[in-house]
Image (cartoon, rainbow, N blue to C red):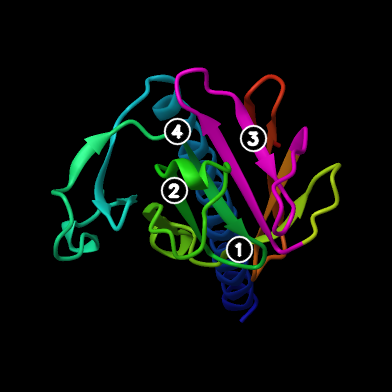
Amino acid sequence: MVSITILGLLSVIVVLDLNAGKRREELQAGVRVLAADLRSLQTRALTAQNIKTCFVMLKNIVCELSASACSSGATSCTPIPPYGVGLHLTKGGMMYTLFADVDSSRNDWQETAGANEVFFTRNLAFSGASNVTISDLFSPVPVSSPEVHVAFERQNGNMHINPCSGTPCEAAVLTIRLRHSKSGDTKDVTITKATGRISIE
């Protein structure tokens, strides 16, 4: 009886340890994916990679994912150099978008709603981090909305951190906190404008 009880306790401990390990790995996966997306955008800006767009009603819109973004009468989906590329984060969400500034009238280092600037949507749930959310966004400039934009200028790679709602503003540092919904554990990705550094903490 004693042996059976000990074996049962050991089994419970092993299962709990495996679950804890899985949750740690999910959080690590979310942080790695976010940091990799930021570094990929930074590289894309520095190497001045083109992005596919079409010209509709006197403005460029992104058609990198699908030519269906181009309405009838639009030019074909062809590559052009964007002014910059960036990432749009929303506090409390599991998803964020990668965007490109392609229209000179909207060269504001942020994703403009309804301007068709998105070229990729990342869902952490489909990236090995199914229980991980962007739990908080910290910046020396008060985050006036639950959204933050991070952008990189083409060729020089200068970073723009915009934590303001409406009128663009600039912050020197942004910390993006990811949280595992089951364990409550958190991990941060910090980006620094002056150095262009992207670090996991």
Quadrant in the picture for residue 94: bottom right
* Residue occupied by mark 3: 160
What whole-number distance in Å separates the C-alpha atoms at marks 3 and 4?
Answer: 12 Å
Q: Relative to 26, is 33 above or below?
A: above
Q: Earlier in the sequence, mark 2 or mark 4?
A: 4
Q: Relative to 52, is 148 above or below?
A: below
* Residue occupied by mark 1: 133
In front of the other: label 4 or label 1? Answer: 4
In front of the other: label 3 or label 4? Answer: 4
Quadrant in the picture for residue 114: bottom left
Residue at (49% x, 31% y) in the render: 39
* Residue occupied by mark 2: 99
Residue 99 appearing in the image: yes
Residue at (58% x, 43% y) in the render: 108
**Callout 4 environment at 10 Å: few (<14), some (14 to 19), or many (20+)?**
many
The reply to whether discs 2 and 1 touch (Cβ–Cβ < 8 Å) is: no
SS for tag 3?
strand
SS for tag 4?
loop
Magenta residue span: 145-173
What whole-number distance in Å separates the C-alpha atoms at marks 4 and 1?
Answer: 30 Å
Q: Earlier in the sequence, mark 3 or mark 2?
A: 2
Residue at (30% x, 58% y) in the render: 57
Q: Relative to 95, is 189 above or below?
A: above
The disc placed on residue 83 is 4
Where residue 107 sits in the image (x, y, percent)?
Answer: 52, 41
What whole-number distance in Å separates the C-alpha atoms at marks 3 and 1?
Answer: 23 Å
92 left or right of 66? right
The reply to whether discs 3 and 2 touch (Cβ–Cβ < 8 Å) is: no
Q: Amino acid at mark 3?
A: His
153 left or right of 197? left
In front of the other: label 3 or label 1? Answer: 3
